[in-house]
Amino acid sequence: MNMQQLNLPEAQLQLRRDADGAVRLYDPLRRAWLVVTPEEWVRQHFVNFLINFRGYPASRVANEVTIRLNNTVKRCDTVIYSPSLQPVAIVEYKAPEVAVTPRVFEQIARYNIVLNVGVLIVSNGLRHYACRVNPDGTFTFLRDIPRWENLVI
């Protein structure tokens, strides 16, 4: 399998090839084997980065979280929860070839109407952005992806 090199630390992913030739990777958070797509590749590397390099407890990170927004079902790529199990950050992933544009931030901001978190993070595996949500609804971009101890105050 030949997936794009990302601007993230190497992750030790469990991969397998099914009888039909499909390559799957194991998501330890969902405890499931998933078809490898460019977006899933980014997700698994970014979650590895959060847990192993930014100190996020795996027990506070959830993938594919379902929410209801305006009578439609949406899925947040990753949601980070505080020790009291309140959502504190949403992470949105795109494939490496997909540019991170204002439209991506509009998407994640819509999810935040429901979850009301303090930090939004977007990554396509090559470029990563994080911003704090200010009380007035504006955003302040951060220099780097926050460490767990700086995220949960």
Image: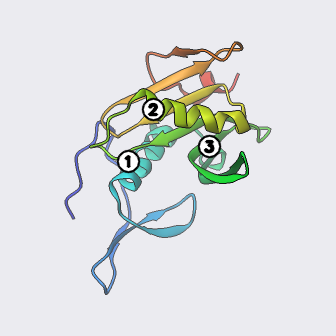
Horizontal side of 73 relative to 17 (left or right) equals right
Mark 2: amino acid? Arg
Question: Dot 2: within a 10 Å radius of its alpha carbon, few (fewer than 14), some, or many (20 or more) residues?
Answer: few
Q: Which residue is mark 1?
A: 42
Say the numbered circle drawn on residue 103. 2
- Image height of 130 relative to 77, above or below: above
Is any part of residue 55 visible from this angle? no
Q: Earlier in the sequence, mark 2 or mark 3?
A: 3
Question: Dot 3: within a 10 Å radius of its alpha carbon, few (fewer than 14), some, or many (20 or more) residues?
Answer: many
Q: Earlier in the sequence, mark 2 or mark 1?
A: 1
| Residue at figure coordinates x 45%, y 32% from the top left | 103
Q: To which quarter of the image does residue 113 belong? A: top right
- Residue 6 location in percent, x, y? 28, 42
Name the one closer to the observer, 20 or 14. 20
Quick one: SS at disc 1? helix
Quick one: SS at disc 2? helix
Mark 3: amino acid? Val
Q: Which residue is mark 3?
A: 79
Horizontal side of 86 relative to 126 (left or right) equals right
| Residue at figure coordinates x 49%, y 25% from the top left | 130
Name the one closer to the observer, 9 or 64. 64
